[in-house]
Image: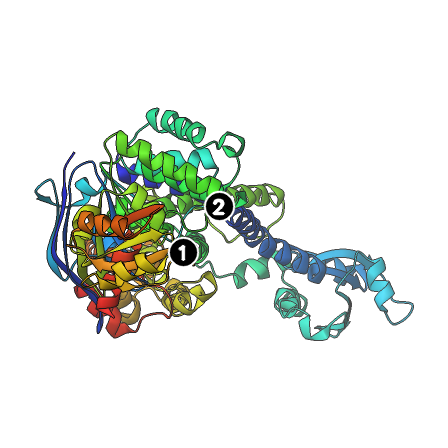
Amino acid sequence: MSTLAVIFNAEFVRRIRSRPYLIGTAIGALGVALIAVIPSFMVHAVSSSTRNLVLVGPPALTTPAGAALRPDFSVVAVLPRLDATPTLAFLDAHRHASAVATLSRTGSRLHALVYARDPSLFPSSFARDLGPLQIALATGAPLESVRSRLTVPIDVRDVAGRFENAGEADAAKAVAYLFVLLLYLAILLNAQAISTSVTEEKTNRIAELLVAAVDPVQLLTAKILAATATGFVQLGVWTAIGFLAGSKLTEGFTNGDVGANAGPLAISSSEILLFVAFFLVGFAQYSVLFAGGASLVSRTEDVGSITGPLMLPVVGAFVLAQLGIQFPNGPLMSSASFVPLLAPFVMFTRIAVTPVPAWQIALSLAINVAAAILFALIAGRVYRVGMLLYGRPPSLRQIVAAMRA
Amino acid sequence: MGSLVLSGVARSFGSVAAVRDVSFTVPSGITFGLLGPNGAGKTTTMRMILGILIPDRGTVSWDGRAVDLRVRRQFGYLPEERGLYAKLKVRDQIAYFGRLHGVMPPYDARRAEAWIERLGLQAYADRPCGELSKGNQQKVQVACAALHQPSLLVLDEPFSGLDPVNADMLLATLRELQREGTSLILSSHQMWQIEDLCEQFCIIAEGTVRAAGTLTELRAGWPTRVVEVEPATTPLRAILDATPGARAIAGPNAGTLTYEVPADLDTAALLRDLVGAGAITRFARLEPRLQDVYLRAIGAAA
């Protein structure tokens, strides 16, 4: 067993058994589950309440109107007339309807008087859905005929042939968002843990013993690999939870039409491989920087002074990746997908939502792997020097001078 | 087993020269005392031996070859500031440091058990190190440093913070290691322990070597000796006062005549003169102690 393996094993076991890691993983899993479930529930809950409608009027109007409104509303009750102005209690009594619409006809024109729970939120689709009925009443043509003539079939195709339809493109964006979020969370939680671990070893003076027996770069490498492995375990748990929650959600809404526009989660094996590759590279880049930086402080309470500035590129890359989901081919995104620290977030986002030439992916990976190695070498030297520095954090000049020694 | 040679090593931290010029040789299998006041450069020298710090100048070699990582893994180190993983169990901690020095399973666990027994840590073997007393943590630290049967064990202030019982136990352990062939380098402010344990010494101050050698060699360079004569009668005092180069110094009690005399004084002739002058109940010629040599060397540096 090599020294690298010895340290890796010890670090991996220590980290995976540590309370912060277990709590972080559990909270992350809960977060992923909530992220997967809550928006759909919210949409379902909100749409359910805003969809429920009470129709009032003569059957000659309410019957065709009910059919016309079906795409966007659920007509929960049809009444011939209102005995009094509807109240909130009246709406609640009718399956928490969002509105009562009374329909009447003046000549050939249809008129609707709507008592809404919240007038500002009453959907504009109400007027659009009743449009064909208005024409049918005015012209005497059958409603279905009018509706079919008013519907223009629109088939949106991906010019690159990547996605079958708009639904698949939407699903790809969701995948990109989820994976970027996972990388962000993994870095956020584990980089902090690495920093704390390094500073703890310095605080309790184990660093000196370790550096005496092990090459600092080897020590740092083993720590990063262990952190990456624990990050992957975390990622696996979160991904499994995310997919489980997603699939349960899909099952739950099979009969409804929530998310009807969403396509299947089209993730190819090559995309998964690329995600793993960029995850590893990104995680390694940030981890070595955090470990090297943390070696410069002597107390765990000072870790924030080093990790704070290092968090800026993580947050910047995360924000940039959000933009990349919407505008993956702009010059900013194209450039950022080669820049170390940013590329792991941005390039994967682009890969997920738009065709990216293979040479760009290869070049980005090469640049970022090289950057990770360069960061590791620099961080290794900083680590070697920093692990034996106590007291006030050294100035940049001192660090550079010490690294040259 | 090899010998350690430091040749003109120097190390600065910014504008502060921690070690200016230190050279010494630690022959195979001996116990070597590195002495000096606080800030003399002992710890920096030890760190350079262990490769933790790279010398600005000079070389450190073991058995004729530069000390690299492969060589360093044969060394053991007990730093002045103790370092243990607080949450790791004693047994696991000792075995882990063994593995770091190349003692692989199942031998790491077996040797850890042997050291736990040797140091009387059985009751604490499955407890996290953070829960142990300072003395017991020190024992764990010794086991971590020695589990791999190092060729050279470097101990920086190994006795600090230990009660007399634990200090004796550590002393006995170090003697055992020495018998097993491990070379020891240690620094300590407990002069009596150092004097008792070490075969060779190096006294450094302000980053340079002030004196080095065996205790006999160090004493040889000492210009005076001390004689004690009892009883403190006038005729005996007169003989001592008349001895060339002799001067009275404070003695252990009023009943003893204590004089510092030149090292090359013919003590036998002095004794004959004293016997001729009156009845003598006690005559002693005292060699300088390590502490005397040390203080003189440090005083010269001051």
Q: Chain of mark 2?
A: B
Of badges 1 and 2, the one in the foreground is 1
Q: Element at badge 2?
A: loop
- Please, is residue B293 above or below residue B33 in the view? below
Q: Amino acid at mark 1?
A: Pro
Q: Residues within 10 Å of mark 2 (few under 14, many from 20)?
A: few
- List x then y, in percent, for residue A383: 29, 58
Q: Specify whether A248 is left or right of B107.
A: right
- List x then y, in percent, for residue A15: 45, 45
Q: Specify whether A217 is left or right of B81.
A: left
Q: State the quadrant of the N terminus of chain A.
A: top left
Q: Specify whether B92 is left or right of A124.
A: left
Please state which of residues A239 and B15 is positioned toward the viewer in this rendering. B15
Going from N to C along the chain, the mark reached first, 1 or 2, is: 2
Q: Residue furthest left?
A: B64
Mark yes or no: residue A72 visible: yes
Q: Residue at the spot x=61%, y=68% of the render?
A: A128
Q: Residue at the spot x=28%, y=57% of the render?
A: B292
- List x then y, in percent, for residue A360: 21, 57
Label number found at residue B163 = 2
Please state which of residues B140 and B206 is positioned toward the viewer in this rendering. B206
How far is the residue under mark 1 from the one under mark 2? 28 Å
Q: Residues within 10 Å of mark 1 (few under 14, many from 20)?
A: few
Q: Which residue is mark 1?
A: B252
| Contact flag, marks 1 and 2 (Cβ < 8 Å) | no
Say how the picture is coloured: rainbow
Q: Amino acid at mark 2?
A: Asp
Q: State the quadrant of the C terminus of chain A.
A: bottom left
| Mark 1 and mark 2 on one chain | yes
- Please, is residue B233 above or below residue B122 in the view? below
Q: Chain of mark 1?
A: B
